[in-house]
Image (spheres, rainbow, N blue to C red):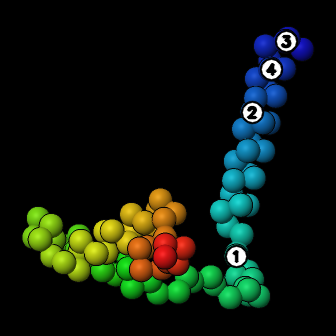
Amino acid sequence: MDGKVLARIAAIVFVAIAITATVIEVTQEEGPAPASTAPALQPPADPLRATLRRCQQFGEAAASDADCLAAWAESRDRFLGRTPASEVPQHSGDQ
């Protein structure tokens, strides 16, 4: 046999195997989905997040809304890891 003929036969066999594997994969029936043993993790509701969403819908009007300004300040403090002024312990060393 010639080398070209052998290469053609090998290519045809390879294509036939690939087509067969694809047909088997497509026609396989999926079994029932495995039951999840762990509950889905859902973070607790965050009122700050809801306020920020509401302020987002206000557009430019949110810049003059006291609730939005307070929510932005709290969000900024959370992001920067700052303690809000109302929670900072007072030092009584000044007498």
Residue type, numbered disc 2: Ile
Q: What distance separates the C-alpha of mark 2 from that of mark 1? A: 30 Å
Task: Indicate which disc, 2 or 1, sits on the residue closer to the N terminus.
Answer: 2
Q: What distance separates the C-alpha of mark 2 from that of mark 3? A: 14 Å
- Alpha-carbon neighbours of circle 4 within 10 Å: few (<14), some, or many (≥20)? few
Quadrant of image for the N terminus: top right
Q: What distance separates the C-alpha of mark 4 from that of mark 2? A: 9 Å
Identity of the residue drawn at 76% across and 88% down: 37
Identity of the residue drawn at 74% across and 52% down: 20
Label placed on residue 12: 2
Task: Indicate which disc, 3 or 1, sits on the residue closer to the N terminus.
Answer: 3
Label placed on residue 92: none
Q: Which residue corresponds to mark 3? A: 3
Q: Nearer the viewer, residue 78 or 31?
A: 78
The answer to whether the residues at label 2 and label 1 have Cβ atoms under 8 Å apart is: no
Q: Which residue corresponds to mark 4? A: 7
Note whether 84 is above or below 42 in the view shown: above
The answer to whether the residues at label 4 and label 3 have Cβ atoms under 8 Å apart is: yes
- Alpha-carbon neighbours of circle 1 within 10 Å: few (<14), some, or many (≥20)? few
Task: Indicate which disc, 4 or 2, sits on the residue closer to the N terminus.
Answer: 4
Q: Nearer the viewer, residue 79 or 52?
A: 79
Q: For the residue labelled by badge 4, is the local secondary structure a helix, a strand or a loop?
A: helix
Q: For the residue labelled by badge 1, is the local secondary structure a helix, a strand or a loop?
A: loop
Residue type, numbered disc 3: Gly
Q: Which residue corresponds to mark 1? A: 30
